[in-house]
Amino acid sequence: MRRFEFAVDREHARAVNEVVADLRRLRVLAISAAVGLGLGSGFLIWLNHPWSYLLAVAFVLGAATALFIGLYTPHRGRVDKLYAAGELVPAVVSETNGKGATLLALVNLAKPSADGPRYALVTRTVRTLPGHRPRTGERVPAVTVRIDRAPTSVGVSDLWQSVSAMPIAWGTRDLNIIERARGAIREVEWQLLTDNLDLAAKVRHADAKRLLLDPRQLPEELRR
């Protein structure tokens, strides 16, 4: 896995990093749900009916799950940890509009247990891209954020269920760091994205929000 180390500017990331903002919203929703379910379970117990106790148990379990998510999210959402855990990948601006831009990224969906890489195209809509020019074809180095939504015992797979791209520019104001990250990515990867910019709309509207690439049609450098 290709890593990219740099000093994350936490103040800058809190202001512009949309992944961190999404995790912050998730935490607020989870804690609110935990409080609501906790109050609901208390009310059901107060009713003192056999059926209300059964519902109260379900509410308590739901509250415990929501509280765990709310407490775990800040640990998982530490921006420096996200950048350290991700793989450096290329992304290219495929479309711009008044509200932001769409990035087309090349990511490897394979887990460490897989036989080899499985490359796919994914898209991400962003509102801001500090340090970059908002134009089609702009090269945006990023790192991957990987998620398995289902428990590992359900449908075990060698591929990550969800992989998105988080721009390096969301973690630093330093243009030299962004340029160093851009240079650490092979030209063959940038060229592959540039050649497939017209697929961005297809990827964006796909059910899984990704398009697996046929290994046989990849450049030789990406087959290993």
Image: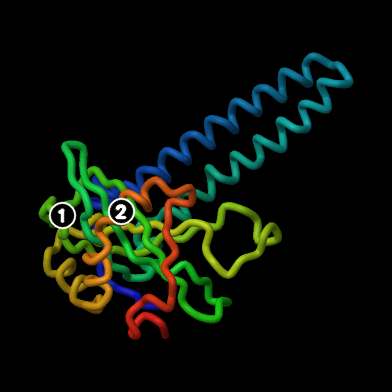
Which amino acid lies under the numbered mark 1 shown in the image of this protein?
Thr
| Residue 219 in view here | yes
Q: Residue at 57% across / 52% down in the picture?
A: 149
* Percent coordinates x, y for residue 194 in the rendering: 21, 65
Q: Residue at 56% across / 45% down in the picture?
A: 69
Q: Residue 218 versus residue 184: which sits nearer the camera?
A: 218
Q: Residue 12 versus residue 17: which sits nearer the camera?
A: 17
Give above or below for 99 relative to 5.
Answer: above
Q: Residue at 41% across / 65% down in the picture?
A: 120
Figure disc tally: 2
Instruction: Write down the residue under mark 2.
Output: 200
Which amino acid lies under the numbered mark 2 shown in the image of this protein?
Ala
Q: Residue at 27% across / 58% down in the picture?
A: 167
* Percent coordinates x, y for residue 176 in the rendering: 12, 69
Label 2 crowd (10 A; few <14 / some 14-19 / many >=20): many
Label 1 crowd (10 A; few <14 / some 14-19 / many >=20): some
SS for tag 1?
loop
Q: CA distance from mark 1 to mark 2?
A: 12 Å
Give above or below for 37 relative to 113.
Answer: above
Quadrant that contains the N terminus: bottom left
Instruction: Write down the residue under mark 1.
Output: 136
